[in-house]
Image: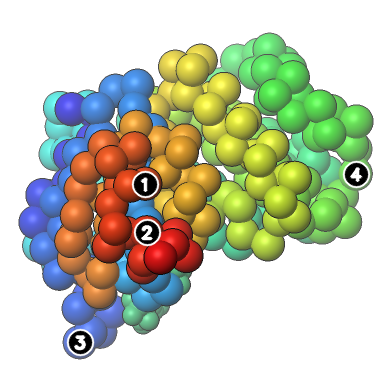
Amino acid sequence: MLLEVKDMRVHYGKIEAIKGISLEVAEGEIVTLIGANGAGKTTTLKTISGLRALTSGTVTFDGADISKMPGHKRVLAGIGQSPEGRGVFPGMTVTENLLMGAYTRTGDLTKDLDEVFELFPRLAERRNQAGGTMSGGEQQMVAIGRALMSKPKVLLLDEPSMGLAPMLVAQIFSIIKTINERGTTVLLVEQNAQQALQLAHRAYVLETGKVVKSAPAADLLNDPQVRAAYLGGE
Ligand code: ATP
């Protein structure tokens, strides 16, 4: 396993947001976490990337226990994150934003920038535009591109489709597929369960800080309970 979370518990003050979650992501997979608002999806990603500390349990990455490793070292170890809300630096250009993702790296980054621009031609066209003036969908592309600039082994994506028009949602999902096909493992958090399950290999369903189901994504698309709760199905 590339990434393994075992019995993870996370608190905000006295409130236990994550109540003993275990999950695994194998190299090459796209795994998605779905669940209602407040189920703990974002907290799970933040704890994997080191933005939140865990109360108990372990996070193992690439064979090493990283449970206590600070976040910046996890980036070096190969964990890249595109955060909820995107976190684009508004006063910096698109190129400068992308280069922030490579903050921990040295050497010639031209080739890596070109790869991001090839994935997102819109960013290439607007490379000198201020991040803050980009549209919501374009800022999402900046956030994903910036995470890719750290050359992650696993890319953590938090709600990449949030607030996007349907056509852009389809485009973002198709780019995630390409990123995965080019060798990056993906852990995807999504409200848009239908599209996430169509894209992912496997999925975990979270409810109030617990995993209530885990299965191949295709199986969950046909699961009556999942259809009723998350897919707007009958
Ligand atoms: P959403 O889809 O709405 O973003 P989520 O599944 O990502 O939800 P989390 O954001 O991880 O859920 O939140 C899990 C629980 O932790 C919720 O009950 C939330 O209110 C709580 N929580 C999250 N962040 C904080 C915080 N900074 N302080 C206190 N409680 C928090």
Mark pair 4, 3: CA separation: 43 Å
Closer to the chain start, of discs 1 and 3, is 3
Closer to the chain start, of discs 2 and 4, is 4
* Three-letter code for the amino acid on which mark 1 is drawn: Leu
User: What's the residue at 25%, 46% (across, down)?
Assistant: 69
State yes or no: discs 3 and 2 in contact (Cβ < 8 Å).
Answer: no
Closer to the chain start, of discs 4 and 3, is 3
Name the residue carrying label 1. 221
**Label 2 secondary element:** helix
Closer to the chain start, of discs 1 and 2, is 1
User: What's the residue at 34%, 27% (across, down)?
Assistant: 29
- Determine which of the numbered discs, if any, sits on residue 83 in the image: none
Q: What quarter of the picture does the C terminus occupy?
A: bottom left
Mark pair 1, 4: CA separation: 40 Å
User: What's the residue at 15%, 32% (across, down)?
Assistant: 64
Q: Where residue 68 sits: x, y (%)?
A: 19, 51
Name the residue carrying label 2. 227
Image mark count: 4
Name the residue carrying label 4. 129
Q: Answer with the quarter of the image where residue 154 lies.
A: top left
* Three-letter code for the amino acid on which mark 2 is drawn: Arg
State yes or no: discs 1 and 2 in contact (Cβ < 8 Å).
Answer: yes
Relative to 113, is 68 above or below?
A: below
**Label 1 secondary element:** helix
State yes or no: discs 2 and 4 in contact (Cβ < 8 Å).
Answer: no
Disc 3 packing (10 Å; few <14; some 14–19; many ≥20): few
* Three-letter code for the amino acid on which mark 4 is drawn: Gln
Would you say residue 11 is visible in this rendering? Answer: yes
